[in-house]
Image: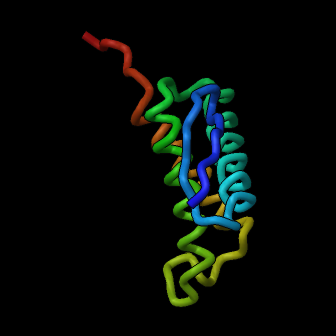
Amino acid sequence: MSQLDVSIMGQNYKLSCKAGEEAELQQAVRHLDERMGVIRDAGKVKGNDRIAVIAALGIAAELLAMKSPQGPLSDLTMAQVQEKIHAMHSVLDSALTPQENLF
């Protein structure tokens, strides 16, 4: 096993991986850090835990769309999948945005 020191959104982590898989783990860390940074920079979601969940949902949706040829997204192009992910982000942003007190 190898251990890597990585940083995701400024937070340091020590991660373990199988020997020889360090490059893939570093690539995954960079991808996650980038996705979380985009969500943070959009300014609609506050808190690293919420940002991480939104990023994870987007990445999971992409993975499922690519892995399952019989899945609900199998007949969509990547652009259409990205459109659906964007729509999910919008719904989640709306749900996570504090509502003004209407009373």
Q: Is residue 55 above or below residue 28?
A: above
Task: Report the number of discs.
Answer: 0
Q: Residue at x 64, y 26 (%)?
A: 10
| Residue 69 locus on image (x, y percent) | 57, 88
Q: Residue at x 24, y 10 (%)?
A: 103
Residue farthest bottom in this picture: 70
| Residue 101 locus on image (x, y percent) | 31, 12
Q: Is residue 11 above or below residue 58?
A: above
Q: Is residue 1 above or below residue 95?
A: below
Residue farthest left in this picture: 103
Between residue 94 and residue 54, name the one nearer to us. Answer: 54
Q: Residue at x 55, y 37 (%)?
A: 13
Question: The N terminus is located in which quarter?
Answer: bottom right
| Rendered image quadrant of residue 85 | bottom right
Query: Horizontal placement of 51 versus 43: left or right?
Result: left
Q: Residue at x 51, y 44 (%)?
A: 54
Between residue 20 and residue 54, name the one nearer to us. Answer: 20
| Residue 43 locus on image (x, y percent) | 61, 24
Q: How is the image coloured?
A: rainbow
Between residue 32 and residue 14, name the one nearer to us. Answer: 14
